[in-house]
Image (cartoon, rainbow, N blue to C red):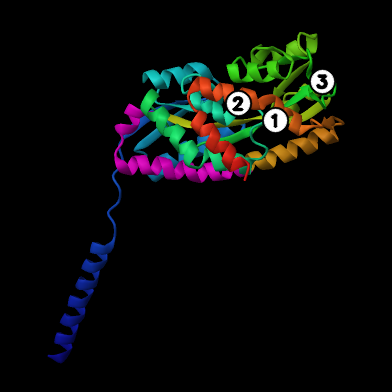
């Protein structure tokens, strides 16, 4: 009899423990079942292309296949500008946003791209990932109906030229291929250059034929696309930082339940951290490769002269585009 009672008590305790464990275990999150399209213009083997594919795979696996992100790389669906317009209109779910391009629709983003504003990734991070960046992100969400999911570094932009550039005087009249966005054209015009907004796909031929005598981009592009063979002078001007990241149409975002929204943010944050480290490491690595290839690596010899030249432009741009308050806050942080 005692053995039977003991057995019954043991069973009761087991059921009680099982019930307690069941009560304490959180329920599996329910995710919105959806397929979304993401367009970007980078090659699949570039760091951001690899990162976006990894993110889409992670999201799909963690949701048990309920959330699918179909990634369209290399402008196979839209060009970068058309993709940006499409998520604003709501005809595209997501795209790879570029803050320099977004500044044409949300002018405060010009703050991130002001020439010679940031001298390091650490300095830029205080602004982009801090309260100022969060405020600009909020304004875009309210004004354009576009939500950024987290910015990442693309690279600092430099110059690859046929002649060495070490001073503002060297820039006078220099024919340089430039993106067509105002912030880029203004930068090179202020330096005294003659910028030409040729499409990137034609930049190599343009430099080869002498239509331009140099290009500006990241060190990776100079090396992997062979520009250094046309002009072996690399000026580490770091004139602008390129900042990119996935953006989603707000109506599409609001159609997702809270668990799905949080998962998208959490998984991208995980990918983003690795991507930022990769970009910084690659920048150092490609500088070494360019040096080993015999390139002449230079810098502007008077950085203060650049600051003096562009400070009036910073103020003019900020006042014209309604972010003078944010510029003032940024300069206060940078000058600490």
| Horizontal side of residue 109 vs 141, given as left or right | right
Q: Secondary structure at mark 3?
A: helix
Q: Nearer the viewer, residue 26 or 57?
A: 26
Marks 3 and 1, how far apart in space?
15 Å
> How many angstroms separate mark 2 from mark 3 (CA)?
21 Å
- Provide the secondary structure element on which disc 1 rests: helix
Q: Quadrant of the N terminus?
A: bottom left
Question: Crowding near pointer 2: few (<14 within 10 Å), some, many (20+)?
Answer: some
Question: Is residue 67 depicted above or below 317 in this figure?
Answer: below
Residue at (32, 44) in percent of width and height:
259
Residue 264 as seen in the image, left or right of residue 80 = left
Q: Quadrant of residue 283?
A: top right
Which residue is tagged 2? 314
Distance from Cα at disc 1 to Cα at disc 2: 10 Å
Q: Which residue occupies the foreground of this view, 240 or 293?
A: 240
Q: Position of residue 286 (x, y in %)?
A: 74, 36
Mark 1, residue position: 307
- Asked where in the image residue 187 lies, by quadrant, the reply is top right
Identify the residue position indicated by label 3 in the image.
169
Badge 1 crowding class, 10 Å Cα cut-off, few under 14, some 14 to 19, many 20 or more, is: some
Give the magenta part as a residue range. 249-277
Residue, x 69% and y 39% (percent of image)? 282
| Mark closest to the chain's N terminus, 2 or 3 | 3
Tell me the residue at 51%/17% (across/down): 81
The mark nearer the N terminus, 3 or 1, is 3
Across and down, in percent, residue 166 comes to 82, 27
- 286 above or below 316? below
Q: Is 252 above or below relative to 176?
A: below
Could one spot residue 275 in this view of the protein?
no
Instruction: Say if mark 2 contacts mark 3, CB within 8 Å.
Output: no
Q: Is residue 214 left or right of residue 14?
A: right
Residue 330 position in % (x across, y down): 56, 37
């Amino acid at each position: 009899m005692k053995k039977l009672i003991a057995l019954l008590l043991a069973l009761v305790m087991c059921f009680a423990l099982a019930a307690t464990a069941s009560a304490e275990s959180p329920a599996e999150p329910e995710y919105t079942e959806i397929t979304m399209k993401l367009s970007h213009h980078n090659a699949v083997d570039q760091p951001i292309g690899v990162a976006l594919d990894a993110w889409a795979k992670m999201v799909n696996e963690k949701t048990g296949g309920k959330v699918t992100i179909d990634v369209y790389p290399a402008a196979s669906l839209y060009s970068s500008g058309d993709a940006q317009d499409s998520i604003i209109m709501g005809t595209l779910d997501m795209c790879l946003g570029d803050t320099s391009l977004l500044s044409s629709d949300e002018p405060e983003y010009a703050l991130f791209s002001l020439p010679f504003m940031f001298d390091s990734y650490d300095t830029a991070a205080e602004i982009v990932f801090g309260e100022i960046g969060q405020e600009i992100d909020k304004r875009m969400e309210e004004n354009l109906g576009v939500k950024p999911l987290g910015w990442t570094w693309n690279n600092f932009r430099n110059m690859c030229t046929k002649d060495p550039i070490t001073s503002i005087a060297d820039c006078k009249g220099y024919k340089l291929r430039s993106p067509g966005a105002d912030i880029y054209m203004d930068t090179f015009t202020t330096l005294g250059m003659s910028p030409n907004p040729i499409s990137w796909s034609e930049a190599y031929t343009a430099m080869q034929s002498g239509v331009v005598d140099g290009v500006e981009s990241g060190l990776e592009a100079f090396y992997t696309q062979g520009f250094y063979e046309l002009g072996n002078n690399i000026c580490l001007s770091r004139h602008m930082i390129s900042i990119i990241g996935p953006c989603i149409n707000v109506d599409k975002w609001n159609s997702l339940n809270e668990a799905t929204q949080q998962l998208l943010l959490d998984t991208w944050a995980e990918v983003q951290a690795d991507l930022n480290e990769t970009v910084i490491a690659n920048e150092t690595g490609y500088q070494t490769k360019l040096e080993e290839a015999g390139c002449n690596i230079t810098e502007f010899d008077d950085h203060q002269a650049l600051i003096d030249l562009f400070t009036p432009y910073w103020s003019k741009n900020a006042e014209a585009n309604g972010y003078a308050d944010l510029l003032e806050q940024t300069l206060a942080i940078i000058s600490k």
